[in-house]
Image (spheres, grey):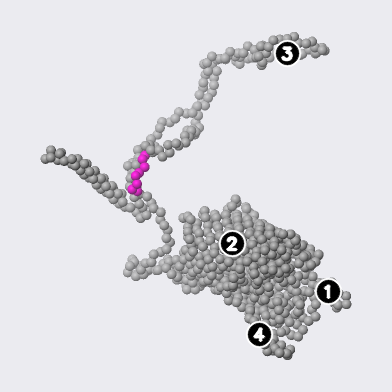
Amino acid sequence: MFSAKQRNPLFLPQLALSSLALGTALSSAQETNSLAAASVGLKPHQAISTNIPPRSPTDFNPDPNRLRLPPPLVTATNYVRVLVISTNEPPAPAAQFNPDPGASLRSFTNAPAALFVEPSAPPLFNEPAIPPELALPRGQVRLNELALPPAPPPASYGLEPLTNGLALPRENTRRNLKILQDFGVPRYTLQPGDYPTNTIPVPDRWRIGFVPWQRYTSGVVDQPYETPVPFLWDPYRQSLLKGDLPILNQNIFLDLTASSETVTEFRRVPTASGVSTAVAGEYEFYGHSEELSIQNNIAFSLDLFQGETVFRPLDWDFKLEPVLNVNYLSASETGVVSPSPTGSLGGNHTPPPNNGFVLNPGDIGTLLNGQTGPAGSYRASGHAERLQDLVTLQQAFGEVHLHDWSDNYDFMSVRAGIQPFNGDFRGFIYNDVNQGVRLFGNWDNNLYQYNMAWFHQLEKDTDSELNTLADRGQDVFIVNLFRQDFIWPGYTAEGSFFANYDHGGLHYDDNGNLVWPEPIGDVRTHELQSYYLGWAGDGHIGRINVDHAFYEVLGHDDFNDIAARPMDINAQMAALEVSYDHDWARYKASFFYASGDKGGNGGTATGFDSIVDNPNFTGGPFSYWARQGFNLGGTSVNLKDSGSLVPDLRSSKYEGQANFVNPGVFIYGVGAECDVTPKLRTFLNANYIRFAETGVLKEVLQTQRVDQEVGEDLSLGIQYRPFLTDNVILSAGWGVLIPGRGYRDIYKTSTDPVPGFSSGPTAAVDSFLYSGLIAVTFTY
């Protein structure tokens, strides 16, 4: 049989393949058994390593070209003194010291005879004899040296042989896997029989509530945790409709907010008497300047979002905020509420009544239907009063979380819709609520925050300054980057870029006034492109609080109405506020500068202007200069707009176009903010204001007398929170402007008297301009 198989030529290859297959099967079975044994007791989020283990460092060095470092320094300090006696042959003493051994090689020549007799040298100094113990040669010289102690015998600690579990190489090792955190709680059944006895199932942890607990036992009613069961709607306790617990699943919340803000304002601003005056015989160029304004906004906010913001950014958010506005204005002159001296007879943006039946002068009384004022005066009538109401959608946006950059929730999100945005710390360039798309997030453990936004501006309502759904024809692009703890801890730096593309056109506001192009100079439609580069900072450097900003704006205006030519743009703005906190008070000093233009005679406009600013600086809403806007000397543009610091000669901050041919301004200010009590806060500010340039004002007003001094701005404001929360806020403020020479040159009440015409003395410039406001805010 053996010989028969031996004669088969395929027998040996088949035998080899069978042996190899058997060995592979046995090896695979051993690996499977080893892997199964290693998997015993495997915990969740653990895995068994099946890769080839690394060899021991004694056999394999992953860095064969490693750097050879010198041995470490010996740290022992117990040195041993060693006495060394020299036994070498001592050196022989020098026979004679010769500083120039080469002198003997030169041949000696006789020196020439001296021309005169030189004095003889003093006797040579004889050195003292050397003591015997110092004379050379010396033998058996002793030398003391410090030597290191002998090294201790090698210890066995740390050199014990490794156990089998630690010795290399190791196979089938366990490693921990990354646990992806999910803070949502899975939905459980609410059947009592599915849980242990003496337990009550609840749908989620949000509805567990607090255990009733009374803080004091003396009878004082103070129970901070008195809500064992959440309420449906309650502003102070845990409630469903203000986002304290989810309305759907485990992480979808709804926050409903209702608020009402009423601002009543009494002011005195320069007002032209107009062509058709409010009172017969009123020939002064400027008339009565008192005005009363009331603005009431009732807002309802719905905010639906998913996510637990304590741990991470929102997954998504959707917000709606409709607003009802009612506003009232009472002026002392015609032409304020409407360019027509008759005022807004139709009211509320409706056309005036039909005049088709007017056939003779007697029918005019029927047309007006009692809307005119008493005989001889149109004050306190429809000619100088306006009552409007508006319902609009002030905010409507959606937000989506796109990506997390790290485990520390450095994130990136996008928001689209009508949304608020402030371009810097104080709102110097762009601070508005408008429609756009914004990409934002943070990075490097929140050290950096970034925004990239595009806003396609909506038109504003003239009287309420709220959004409408009309297209403004303007695009704004914004990119900024914030860095916290920049150089100094507690100081945040910002770099920003703004681009403003105003496409121009022809537009009248809701009251019938032409707003763009600006009705001054050579009136033409024009487009404007401006680019802002800025650096700003906010925070503290040690004990000193610092807030600063600097902007450079470049661009091109296709046709400036005042200069009557195309203009390049090159203007600057700078602001600095330094403050110091002492106990309950903050003392501050501020400076603001906006460059001005000398008259628009060159090809470059150097007056600074913003896009849509709303700065909280130099007194904020209580300052007369910052809050009020007033007309320029009876023209159809404003010297400055309300809620702005820049005298930019625009027709309107929201509806008009930016104008870079303007006088600019210097503002020097000091102030203090005091937390008098936890409920009461006060604001004190004093500012000195000057125009940067007056050439453009002289050109527009056709005069040679306009001084740079605007005047002194003084303001006082208080804020009171009776319940220590923001649910009720009472604010009141008073600001005054003491006119300087420049203001009196612009707003001179009348010209010099004309002989034979003026029947009385010339009226003086208003010497006391004031702005008083009372604001009441309710939030529920």
Of label 1 and label 4, which has the lower sequence position? 4
Quadrant showing the C terminus: bottom right
Q: Which of these two is toward me, 774 or 148?
A: 774
Q: Quadrant of residue 184?
A: bottom left
Residue labelled with disc 2: 477
Q: Is residue 594 visible?
A: no
Q: Which of these two is toward me, 754 or 154?
A: 754
* Three-letter amino acid code of the residue under disc 3: Leu
**Which numbered disc, 2 or 3, marks the residue closer to the eye?**
2
Residue labelled with disc 4: 353
Of label 2 and label 3, which has the lower sequence position? 3
Task: Report the magenta residues as a range.
Answer: 49-56
Residue at image location 59% in from the left, 72% down from the top? 470
Q: Position of residue 124 (x, y in %)?
A: 73, 13
* Three-letter amino acid code of the residue under disc 1: Thr
Q: Is residue 190 visible?
A: yes
Circle on res. 762: 1
Dominant secondary structure, magenta: loop
Circle on res. 124: 3
In the structure shown, which secondary structural element does the residue marked by tag 1 occupy? loop
How far apart marks 2 and 3 lie (CA) works out to 98 Å
How far apart marks 2 and 4 lie (CA) works out to 44 Å
Circle on res. 397: none
Of label 2 and label 4, which has the lower sequence position? 4
**Which numbered disc, 1 or 2, marks the residue closer to the eye?**
2
In the structure shown, which secondary structural element does the residue marked by tag 2 occupy? strand
